[in-house]
Amino acid sequence: MKSIVIHAAKDLRIEDRPVEEPGPGQVLLRLAAGGICGSDLHYYNHGGFGTVRLKEPMILGHEVSGVIEKLGSGISGLKPGQLVAVSPSRPCYSCRYCREGMHNQCLNMRFYGSAMPFPHIQGAFREMLVADALQCVPADGLSAGEAAMAEPLAVCLHATRRAGEILGKRVLVTGCGPIGLLSILSARRAGAAEIVAVDITDFTLAMAMRAGADKTINTKTDPEGLAPYLADKGTFDILYECSGAAAALAQGIAALRPRGTIVQLGLGGAEMALPMSAVTAKELTINGSFRFHPEFAVGVELMRKGLIDVKPLITHTVACDEALSGFELANDRSRAMKVQIAFA
């Protein structure tokens, strides 16, 4: 089967790998669609992120959907021919954090396409994938591309949960890539009264308006665009920081009102300086947000019910054989939002 394998920065190859057989409680999937994520781009562009570096070839990919080809023993609720969204999150369910219900903090997590442990956790960009039945959420009524958006949507639903009460609140989103746009959709679904989105490219900001932002600000062409929101110690109740850029975080903190909440999603690959004096004086709350777990199935259900529409975010789809051009396209935030690979 064809697999998309990263060997080093800018060394992406399509290789032939053996097809595995499903064991008890597992399913064999024919992959349908896979989305190129920011972390995939970090491996492609830099060979890793932060202190994490590739030490061996690794199959990329964790935003995927597939059609069930074969069921292992002991499975109910799934059937051959069914489209499913596949959660890349595979916690152990037995460590101290799993037992406390914090599965996203699992000490033995096996998350698709991660070079954090060694040997690396191989990813899901392959024509045939064996997955645990627990990872598979029926996606009847969705397209393969929509089902593959369940993973980034789950990230943002988890962040929205970390933000606390949103009903009637004013929200600022910094960074309008796929996570920023899905945060806008999630915050709106949670009842945000006003959403302002900030970025440095007109294309991403136009996409933010399509996703439901009330106003957008290009801080590259309008460096003082947030100035009206700084009066009287700030305006916004909640900041979704999705860029991983220190400058965006500082601007967001300046625009937050006292006792506002920061939800940090962006991981820029380097540590960010924090204006702690402002955090202290305004009594701000800082909430990190990392991955997800129960939110994955919730996201699939919201899409199936038509309550969240991710289709406009999927700007490009390329064939598996064109994966390299797909990664280059995904690097270009002036014209691409979510680039997906079609495996079937």
Image (spheres, rainbow, N blue to C red):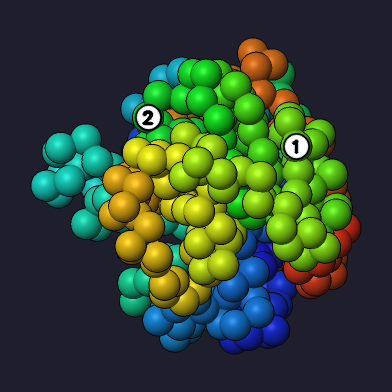
Q: Quadrant of residue 309?
A: top right
Give the amino acid at mark 2: Gly
User: Mark 1 = which residue?
Assistant: 215
Mark 2–mark 1 distance (CA, rounded to whole Å):
23 Å
Q: Quadrant of the C terminus?
A: top right
C-beta proximity under 8 Å, tags 2 and 1:
no
Quick one: SS at disc 2? loop
Q: Which mark is residue 22?
A: none
Against 42, residue 160 (above or below) is above
Residue 205 locus on image (x, y percent): 79, 48
Residue that extends furthest to the top in the rendered view of this protein: 305
Residue at the (65%, 79%) spot, across then down: 45
User: Mark 2 = which residue?
Assistant: 164
Residue at the (56%, 67%) spot, across then down: 247
Residue at the (64%, 69%) spot, across then down: 41
Sequence order check, earlier mark of 2 and 1 = 2
